[in-house]
Amino acid sequence: MSRHPEVKWAQRADKVFITVQLSDSKDAKVNLEPEGVFSFTGTAGTGNAHYELKLDLFDKVVVEESKINIGVRSIFCILEKTEKVWWKKLLRGDGKPPHYVKVDWDKWVDEDEDKGAGDLDLGGMDFSNFGGMGDMMGGMGGMGDMMGGMGGMGGMDEFEDSDDEGQEVTKPADKAKGDAEPDEHGAGTSEKKEAEAST
């Protein structure tokens, strides 16, 4: 008996993003037909459980321009729509979608905010075309570049917020000035404050 993997989806006017969530999948096979039929088979888990999936998409797709990436944790597909319009839903028919098909809120944008797929960070994924799927196990090339865009992660001294709000803080210039002017006992003001705090 086969199982259904979890599927997440999002869209733009010209593309549909489908992610098949299946960690450590083996023998993954994805098929896409121009009429909008998306199918997946593969095995995963310690017992090599068989997973399969067939989705009748809302409309037609361009197989030759669609792309796939088979990674360690998921199979990510970018399907090129035949008509550049927003779909009302992912699947054909009037019924509810299956429980394993969910919206991918990490990739979702509303129709009026659509700027194309250029607004989606693909994390340096290496994609193969569906049309020429000679090497379906393309893998996740370029993972080293994934952390490249995370500038500003320098030392913690960049943060100006402090937990000692409400306490009097002396500026370095004031502290130096205070040390330079001894009081009547011959101690600088910072030494005096330290002495007061210990009593």
Image (cartoon, rainbow, N blue to C red):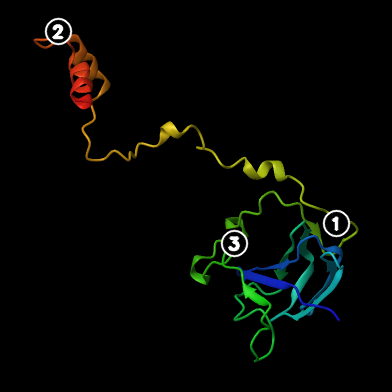
Q: Earlier in the sequence, mark 2 or mark 1?
A: 1
Determine the secondary structure under disc 3. Answer: loop
Q: Residue furthest front?
A: 199
Which mark lies nearer to you, 3 or 1? 1
Q: Is 136 left, or right, of 147 in this rendering?
A: right
Task: Look at the image and tell me in which quarter the N terminus lies.
Answer: bottom right
Residue type (three-letter) at the residue carrying disc 3:
Gly
- Provide the secondary structure element on which disc 2 rests: loop
Q: Residue 85's spot in the image, x, y percent?
A: 61, 75
Along the line of sight, the residue nearer the viewer: 136 or 190:
190
Q: Is residue 27 left or right of residue 154?
A: right
In the picture of the structure, the residue carrying the numbered disc 2 is 186
**Nearest the eye: 26 or 12:** 26
Mark 3 Cα within 10 Å, few/some/many (few <14, many 20+)?
few
Q: CA distance from mark 3 to mark 1?
A: 27 Å
Which residue is disc 1 drawn over? 137
Identify the residue shown where x is 22% and y is 18%: 190
Checking the image for residue 116, the label placed there is 3
> Sequence order check: which comes first, mark 3 or mark 1?
3
Which residue shows up at 62% across the image and 60% down it? 117
Check the picture and name the quadrant holding the C terminus.
Answer: top left
Amino acid carrying label 2: it is Gly
In this view, 188 is above or below 40: above
Identify the residue at horizontal 18%, vertical 13% (top origin). Answer: 188
Above or below, 124 relative to 82: above
Can the viewer see residue 174? no
* Gap between marks 3 and 2 measured at Cα: 72 Å
Q: Nearer the viewer, mark 3 or mark 2?
A: 2
